[in-house]
Image (tube, rainbow, N blue to C red):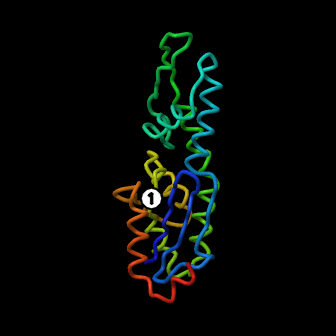
């Protein structure tokens, strides 16, 4: 109750205020800049950097899933690419950071909007109960970036679900099991 769930999937980034009842449309936002968007952006940036080696989207996604981050760069992230048949090591930290941060502006705006339009007496509780889910919740530094962005409103707390890949499915099953029969007509 009084939680803001931010589910960062492949195709969509879905945000929903949970407050004891089935959420209305005003409680939800869907953004279309999510995991696939980061993959495309990172792929393009890699292609620009490593001009002499074709890089597959699959490889770009694999690298992103292993190293994704949005915190300040503290050390390099390097990867070997085949250039004219020879392995060449490239530092790709800046490109990866830029791609991962490309979803932040719209996501942070949606989070702020859902918090500031919530009932005033529950805004502090909502701000301190933000839950990240989905594959994109594994981006290193994301909870800290969100907390920092919300600092102007007071302290906040962002947590990541234990199992980012399957937590959404488990939650949907729980919701479905507890849903009254008459609500199934609204689904």
Q: Nearer the viewer, residue 117 or 138?
A: 138
Picture coordinates of residue 20, whole percent (x, y): 45, 82
Q: Nearer the viewer, residue 103 or 13?
A: 13
Query: Which quadrant of the structure image shows residue 37?
Result: top right
Residue at x 58% of width, y 32% of height: 95
Q: Residues within 10 Å of mark 1 (few under 14, many from 20)?
A: many
Q: Which residue is mark 1?
A: 133
- Vertically, is 138 above or below 50? below
- Vertically, is 62 above or below 35? above
Residue at x 42% of width, y 64% of height: 169
Q: Quadrant of the C terminus?
A: bottom right
Picture coordinates of residue 127, whole percent (x, y): 49, 68
The furthest residue to the bottom: 182
Q: Nearer the viewer, residue 111 or 21?
A: 21
- Vertically, is 136 above or below 151? above
Picture coordinates of residue 129, whole percent (x, y): 43, 68
């Amino acid at each position: 109750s009084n939680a803001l769930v931010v589910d960062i999937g492949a195709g969509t980034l879905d945000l929903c205020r949970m407050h004891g009842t089935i959420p209305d449309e005003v409680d939800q936002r869907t953004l279309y800049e999510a995991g696939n968007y980061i993959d495309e952006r990172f792929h393009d940036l890699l292609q620009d950097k490593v001009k002499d080696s074709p890089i597959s989207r699959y490889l770009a996604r694999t690298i992103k899933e292993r190293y994704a981050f949005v915190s300040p760069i503290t050390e390099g992230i390097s990867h070997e690419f085949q250039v004219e048949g020879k392995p060449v090591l490239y530092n790709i930290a800046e490109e990866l950071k830029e791609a991962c941060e490309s979803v932040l502006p719209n996501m942070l705006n949606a989070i702020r909007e859902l918090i500031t339009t919530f009932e005033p007496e529950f805004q502090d509780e909502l701000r301190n109960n933000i839950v990240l889910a989905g594959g994109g919740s594994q981006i290193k530094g994301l909870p800290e970036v969100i907390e920092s962005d919300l600092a102007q409103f007071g302290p906040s707390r962002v947590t990541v679900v234990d199992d980012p890949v399957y937590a959404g499915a488990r939650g949907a099953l729980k919701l479905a099991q507890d849903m009254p029969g008459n609500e199934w007509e609204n689904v």
